[in-house]
């Protein structure tokens, strides 16, 4: 058990952590250090890209070892890179904008179904479908949609930053539109004035 303490330490968890806690912390740390969120921007000078990649690799290893420790019959759900042939890679590079339809087209071309994505990403299939269909009203917080998009892109071996740069402005436009919830969240000033 002592050799596993280092894995718990890396995940910032006590040795009594449950499998659910291990998975949640792994996903949180993986998301935190995989992109460039504001929380770690101050570390960028001290935490180079090489160090970040090494940390992420150690994080994957720790997660895999702890999952196997908790349930040796159950393989860890660390995404393995999809095998993408040159023709498909070239086709993906030609995509001008990664909107929901483009993400679905990539997924289908790679022969991946939503249930397979769920097993690895732990994102419910209906949420994955809402991403592809751009049904934005199901995503109450932008941060949740962002994390789902990052996981979706990683699973398909796409550049998460490029996918975010293409996809998120569509969500932000929707939230600012009359049919978006951006308008619903604003208080009705006329009603408030009428009540006084």
Image (spheres, rainbow, N blue to C red):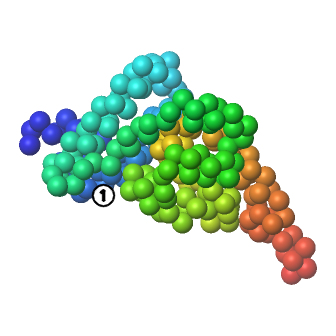
Give the side of residue 136 with respect to residue 110, left or right. right
Q: Quadrant of residue 178?
A: bottom right
In this rendered view, identify the residue nearer to me: 63 or 185.
Answer: 63
- Residue 61, relative to residue 74: is it above or below? above
In this rendered view, identify the residue nearer to me: 159 or 44.
Answer: 159
In this rendered view, identify the residue nearer to me: 109 or 167.
Answer: 109
Give the side of residue 140 with respect to residue 2, left or right. right
Can you give x and y, in whole percent of width and height, for residue 196 in the image? 87, 79
Can you give x and y, in whole percent of width and height, for residue 12 in the image? 29, 41
Q: Residue at x 38, y 43 (%)?
A: 79
Q: Residues within 10 Å of mark 1 (few under 14, many from 20)?
A: few
Give the side of residue 149 with respect to residue 155, left or right. right
Q: Residue at x 67, y 43 (%)?
A: 98
Can you give x and y, in whole percent of width and height, for residue 59 in the image? 32, 36
Q: Is residue 121 visible?
A: yes
Q: Quadrant of residue 129?
A: bottom right
Q: Residue at x 58, y 32 (%)?
A: 87
- Quadrant of the image for the N terminus? top left
Can you give x and y, in whole percent of width and height, for residue 33 in the image? 45, 34
Task: Report which residue position mark 1 lands on.
Answer: 20
- Residue 196, relative to residue 183: is it above or below? below
Q: Is residue 38 visible?
A: no
* Residue at far front of view: 87
* Number of numbered discs on residues: 1
Give the side of residue 67 with respect to residue 92, left or right. left
* Residue at far bottom of view: 195
Q: Residue at x 27, y 48 (%)?
A: 76
Give SS at disc 1.
Answer: helix
């Amino acid at each position: 058990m002592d050799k596993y303490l280092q894995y718990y330490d890396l995940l910032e968890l006590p040795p009594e952590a449950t499998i659910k806690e291990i998975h949640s912390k792994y996903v949180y740390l993986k998301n935190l250090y995989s992109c460039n969120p504001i929380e770690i921007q101050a570390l960028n000078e001290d935490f180079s890209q090489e160090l970040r990649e090494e940390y992420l690799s150690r994080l994957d290893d720790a997660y895999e070892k702890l999952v196997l420790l908790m349930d040796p019959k159950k393989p860890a759900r660390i995404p393995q890179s999809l095998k993408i042939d040159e023709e498909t890679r070239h086709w993906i590079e030609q995509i001008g904008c990664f909107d929901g339809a483009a993400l679905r087209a990539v997924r289908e071309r790679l022969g991946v179904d939503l249930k397979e994505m769920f097993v690895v990403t732990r994102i419910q299939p209906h949420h994955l479908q809402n991403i592809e269909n751009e049904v934005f009203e199901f995503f109450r917080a932008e941060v949740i949609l962002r994390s789902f998009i990052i996981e979706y892109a990683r699973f398909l071996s796409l550049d998460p930053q490029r996918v975010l740069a293409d996809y998120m402005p569509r969500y932000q436009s929707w939230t600012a539109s009359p049919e978006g919830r951006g308008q619903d969240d604003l208080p009705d000033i006329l009603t408030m004035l009428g009540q006084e």
